[in-house]
């Protein structure tokens, strides 16, 4: 898949307000940028970090009015150089469009992914048992779950029924109970962006991509824009024990976000996120292909509710939050042995896309083969200090 504005930008990109981060070789560090079809523009005199940009009052108007932003490069060249095989570090390439923000994720917010978590739990992470248990779970739970509002009286009654039938699960608790699952997906500065390799643990034998929409939220809890994410997941690790969630979710290059943040304005609002269709395509070097989609209209908790459960009076994030909203697409197609379902193979190309947000494209590799994460918060502060931006 070529890396160019036609494939990576939204269909209506000429009207979109797109901001993000780019590696700038001349600074040996990251630059906050505005992107459009004509080029990539330096916003660091307006805000040295994405965190600072999202804290600006009247953000869209401020970015639009900043006419002194130097043009750093042609967008086509930056996109092309972001590709994993063609990346030249002496030239600019895109980074994940976040820096100091906490990277959080909401779990089991779609019924299909909820059922898959229950299946992982009951298989204890053994993919060979998944098909039989999937049928048992779907038969037992029936068609009631999609219509149940989390935290409602109906949800409480359903919980009592499932406990009596021996079908209750910790995942059902966060799926239909009053409290959403909000967990730490990754550390600030650790996410990879468009064209980077994404990592799976070498010992994992059952894993999958999780295509999601990610909200950009500032320290005041204001939702200012959206982007795409891949919450790379180790199903066998979490299936053995929910206490291995950190091991299943937070590994080198296991969090991809990008290619940019689309700011909310008159052309794109939170209601558009609520209607977004998110597609997933996987293409393996073994000839395997997979395609699927999920629609945000099927989410069981509203994005505003999820943000409110992540940040607010009970939990502050002074540098803001990037919040994954969850996925309904857990691929179950057999790959290899019958009945074992889907798992990644090294070299898989993964495309997470949405018409209004563009495309996030990455390639799968083992975590310990991917370049280690070394440029953290300390390195960013030193770099900005040398550039006179602090």
Image (spheres, rainbow, N blue to C red):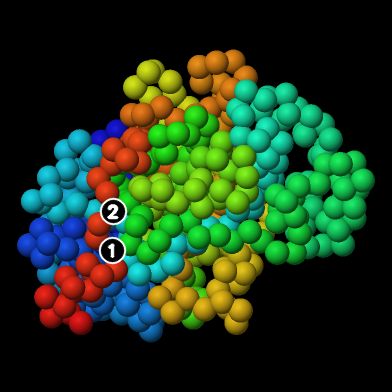
Give residue 122's position: percent from left, percent from top.
Answer: 71, 36
> Which residue is the site of mark 1?
376
Q: Residue at x 56, y 21 (%)?
A: 334
Return the residue nearer the eye: 295 or 107: 107
Q: Secondary structure at mark 1?
A: loop
Tell me how far mark 1 sits from mark 2, CA to CA. 8 Å
Whether residue 276 is visible: no
Question: Measured from the top left, where is residue 358 in percent x and y?
Answer: 37, 48
Judge left or right: residue 289 versus residue 161.
left
- List the residue tagged with mark 2: 373
Q: For this rendering, which residue is in front, 26 or 199?
A: 199
Is the C-beta separation of discs 1 and 2 under 8 Å? yes
**Residue occupying image coordinates x 90% and y 52%:** 160
Left or right? Give the position of 123 relative to 228: right
- Residue 156 appears at what percent x and percent y? 86, 58
The quadrant in which residue 352 appears is: top left
Question: Which residue is at 79% across, 50% downward?
Answer: 147
**SS of the residue under disc 2:** loop
| Above or below, comparing residue 78 to residue 86 in the picture | below
Image height check: is 147 above or below 123? Answer: below
């Amino acid at each position: 898949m070529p890396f160019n504005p036609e494939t990576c930008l939204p269909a209506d990109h000429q009207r979109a307000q797109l901001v993000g981060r780019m590696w700038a070789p001349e600074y040996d560090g990251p630059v906050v940028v505005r992107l459009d079809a004509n080029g990539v523009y330096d916003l660091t005199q307006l805000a040295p970090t994405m965190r600072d940009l999202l804290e600006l009052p009247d953000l869209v108007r401020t970015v639009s009015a900043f006419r002194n932003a130097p043009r750093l490069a042609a967008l086509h060249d930056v996109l092309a150089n972001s590709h994993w095989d063609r990346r030249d570090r002496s030239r600019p390439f895109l980074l994940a469009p976040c820096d100091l923000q906490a990277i959080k994720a909401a779990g089991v917010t779609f019924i299909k992914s909820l059922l898959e978590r229950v299946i992982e739990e009951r298989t204890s992470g053994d993919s060979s048992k998944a098909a039989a248990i999937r049928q048992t779970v779907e038969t037992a739970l029936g068609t009631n779950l999609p219509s149940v509002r989390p935290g409602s009286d109906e949800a409480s009654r359903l919980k009592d029924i499932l406990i009596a039938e021996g079908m209750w699960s910790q995942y059902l608790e966060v799926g239909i109970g009053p409290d959403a699952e909000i967990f730490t997906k990754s550390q600030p500065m650790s996410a990879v962006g468009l064209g980077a390799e994404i990592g799976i643990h070498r010992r994992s034998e059952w894993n999958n991509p999780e295509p999601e929409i990610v909200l950009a939220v500032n320290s005041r809890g204001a939702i200012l824009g959206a982007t795409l994410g891949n919450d790379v997941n180790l199903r066998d690790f979490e299936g053995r024990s929910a206490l291995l969630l950190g091991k299943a979710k937070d590994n080198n290059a296991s969090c991809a976000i990008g290619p940019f943040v689309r700011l909310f304005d008159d052309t794109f609002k939170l209601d558009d996120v609520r209607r977004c269709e998110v597609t997933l395509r996987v293409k393996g070097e073994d000839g395997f292909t997979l395609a699927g989609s999920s629609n945000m209209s099927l989410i069981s908790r509203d994005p505003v509710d999820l943000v409110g459960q992540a940040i607010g009076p009970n939990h502050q994030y002074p540098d803001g939050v990037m919040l994954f909203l969850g996925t309904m697409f857990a691929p179950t197609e057999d790959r290899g042995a019958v009945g074992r379902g889907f798992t990644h193979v090294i070299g898989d190309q993964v495309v997470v896309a949405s018409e209004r947000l563009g495309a996030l494209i990455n390639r799968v590799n083992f975590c310990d083969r991917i370049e280690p994460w070394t440029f953290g918060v300390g390195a960013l502060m030193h770099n900005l200090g040398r550039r006179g931006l602090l």
